[in-house]
Image (tube, grey):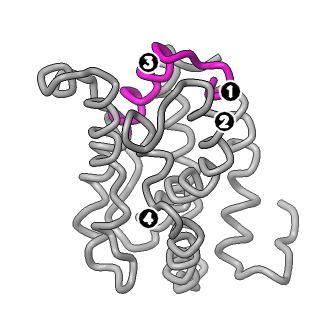
Amino acid sequence: MNAPPKSLPLILSELRIATTRQHQVLEKRIPFYTADRALYTRLIEAYYGFYRPLESLLFPVAMSIPDLDWLIRSKTPSLEADLYALGLDAAAIDAIPLCRFSVQTRSVADVLGVLYVLEGATLGGQSLRNGLYARLGIDEHTGGRFFAVYGTATLLMWRGFLACLYEVCDPLERAQSVVAAQGTFETFERWLEQREVLQ
C-alpha cells in the first residue's frame, strides 16, 4: 500500500487509497452521460433500491453521531420524490426490489465508512447535475432532486461529514471504516449489475 499523504488526516488518506480504484471503475460504468429518460428512471429506481434499505441499517447508529445531522442527510425521501415526478405511483415504488446488505453498520466507524461513499457520491453528483438536467429536461422539482439534495449547502455538508469522520483515529476503527467503504462500493456495483443499468 502506498504511504498516505501527510497533509490529510489518516482516515481520509486511507479511505481514498483503498477505494479510489473502485470509485473510478464504477463511475465509468454508470451511464449518466448517455442515459435517456427511460434509463435514467431505471437508474433512480436502482438507487432507491440501494439507498432505502441501507439508510434503514445506518439509522440507529447514525442518529447517535454528534453533529452528523443524519435526518438531513438521508437521500431516500429525495429518491422517492424523483420517482413520483418521473411517473411512478405508490404501488410501483413499493414494488421496487431492495438490495440486501452484508456490510457491517454496528459501530460509528462502520457507519462513517459507508457514509464516505454515500456523501462522496452526493458531492460528486454536483458535476453531473447541470448536464443531466439540460439533456433530460428535468430539474430538482421534476425528477432530479437527488442531485440537488443539499442545494447550495453541498460543500458545507461535506465538510460537516469530514469533521465527524476525522474523529475516527484509532487504527482498528480506521480499518473498520475502510472495510465498510470498500464493501459499500462492491455491493453497489453488484446491485447495479443485477438491475442491468451499468454499461
| Disc nearer the start of the sequence (4/2) | 4
Residue at mark 2: 131
Going by the numbered disc 4, the residue's amino acid type is: Asp
Residue at mark 1: 33
Going by the numbered disc 3, the residue's amino acid type is: Arg
Mark number, residue 195: 3
Residue 106 in the image: x percent, y percent?
32, 64
Please name which of the two marks, 4 or 1, marks the residue nearer to the observer.
Answer: 1
Tell which of 169 and 80 is nearer to you. 80
Whole-angstrom CA distance, mark 3 to mark 2, is 24 Å
Please name which of the two marks, 1 or 3, marks the residue nearer to the observer.
Answer: 1
Query: Is 92 one of the magenta-colored residues?
Result: no
Query: Is 40 one of the magenta-colored residues?
Result: yes
Q: Quadrant location of residue 133?
A: top right
Q: Is residue 126 left or right of residue 28?
A: left
Tell which of 183 and 20 is nearer to you. 20
Residue at mark 4: 110
